[in-house]
Amino acid sequence: MATFAHLRPTWRIVFATLYLLIALPLAAPSAQAQVGGPIYTAAVDGVISRYAVSYLRRVLHEAEAAQATALIIRLGGQGAVLRDVRGLAADLAVAKVPVVVYVAPDGTSSGAAGAWLLSAAHLAVMSPGTSFGAATPLAEPTGDVSVQVRDLFLTEVIRQLGGWNRDRGRSDAWVDRAARVGAVLTNEQAIALNPPAVNMVARDDEDLLTSLEGRAVTLEDGSQLVLHTLGRTAVPLAPNIGEQILLLLADPTVAFLLLVMAGIAIYAEFAAPTVGILAGVGGVLLISSMVGIVALPVHWLSFFGLVFAFGLIAADLFVHSHGGLTVVGLVVLVLSALNLFDAAQAPGVAVALWAIALVSLLIAGFAALGIYLVVRMRSQPVTTGQEGLIGRLAEVRRRLAPEGMVFVDGALWSAVCENGEVEPGEYVRVTGVHELRLTVRRPEI
């Protein structure tokens, strides 16, 4: 206060007070209580794909526009497309409202999505019995790159994840291993680190809102906010109809089943034409399947393997392979379905084993039924045409000595008896057909 030494004591006090009132707010940002704004929640239970990211970005924009007290994102699924979840994490890290990422309910394995989004969130919360991280690296460069480029890429990922966690006072000890080789942390392991890897553990939504009361959050612009959530009710921001459809189609199991049903419908149209009805249904199913598939990193070799498998199974109905083509087709189908999506670029994204087993068993069952019916048909005597007369009883109309005329199947036939003469009115059994002439025998008594 040497600046004011030449002034009278009274004026020195006045100027000192003004100096403190002006200088202190500029020296350090003060924590401001968040009051009045709504608390929004959004839940994602499936794969974090481009469609899920689009939905969550819309929710984030609505929360920022409403100056929400907090946005709570509830993660209930495991699979994630890394290229999409990285972009979403970057958006959450610079959000203009406090973002809380909550891994729930109990038993949820949030996978790579949990590792990225918990790190980016202002407050990271887990439910008991949950985990985050994956057994594979949290990021992989796309395409063929050199070892040096891959190392630089992973170093940048580690710097980003570690920086977010350090800025929010959380542990980054797990980041290097998780980014390079993969790591999975349960809620107990995460909270046991020093400092913890997450801010808190909450049993349910009510416990979460109670635990958030009084928490201080620092936003990207340096402003500090104190949350007041006790006794308040969160407002859910659900996906609209279009977003719900896209989220459903991006499920890998749904995309696979739609592709299978499209193949069945298109094949049925060729097998039994229905004026294009089944072909139209198959086209709609195929387009729906492709809408979901393009949102996921696909192994296109496996995709065309599925198409080839359907072709083999369909060909077995026209080629007498006794089920051989169907067996080969089923093997190709199972292998292709298991490797349909790139696990390195989308850890946790895969077709459910029950769906693969169900499709395989249904196809095998229908193929076995078809083979049984074909074999049974071939073993039955012919009942149509001239060959269908063999074994039938015929009435003699003109004496067989040994040639004559018989009546069978509504028509007169020239016939030759193989075992003697037969009088008109008697019956003989047809044994053969040769150029519109029947051979017959007198029934043995």
Image (cartoon, rainbow, N blue to C red):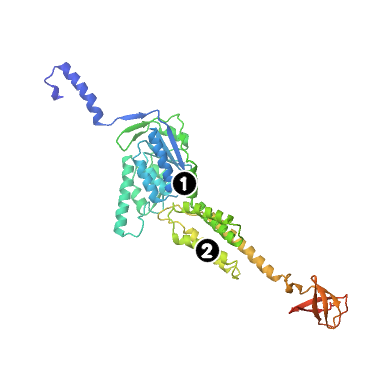
Q: Is residue 400 above or below residue 187?
A: below
The amino acid beneath tag 1 is: Gly
Residue 275 percent coordinates (x, y): 60, 57
Q: Is residue 235 above or below residue 311?
A: above
Residue under numbered circle 1: 77
What residue is drawn where x is 54% and y is 55%? 355
Pick the front one: 327 or 5: 327
Left or right: residue 13 versus residue 57 is left
Left or right: residue 131 versus residue 428 is left
Residue 209 percent coordinates (x, y): 44, 33
Pointer 2 local density, CA inside 10 Å: few below 14, some 14–19, many at least 20: many
Q: Is residue 1 above or below residue 393?
A: above
For marks 1 and 2 on the same chain, the one whose residue lies earlier in the sequence: 1
Question: From the image, which quarter does the N terminus lie in?
Answer: top left
Residue under numbered circle 2: 309
Q: Please tell me whether mark 1 or mark 2 is closer to you in this view.
A: 2
The amino acid beneath tag 2 is: Ala
**Which disc number belongs to residue 281?**
none
User: What element does badge 1 sit on?
Assistant: loop
What residue is drawn where x is 36% and y is 31%? 226
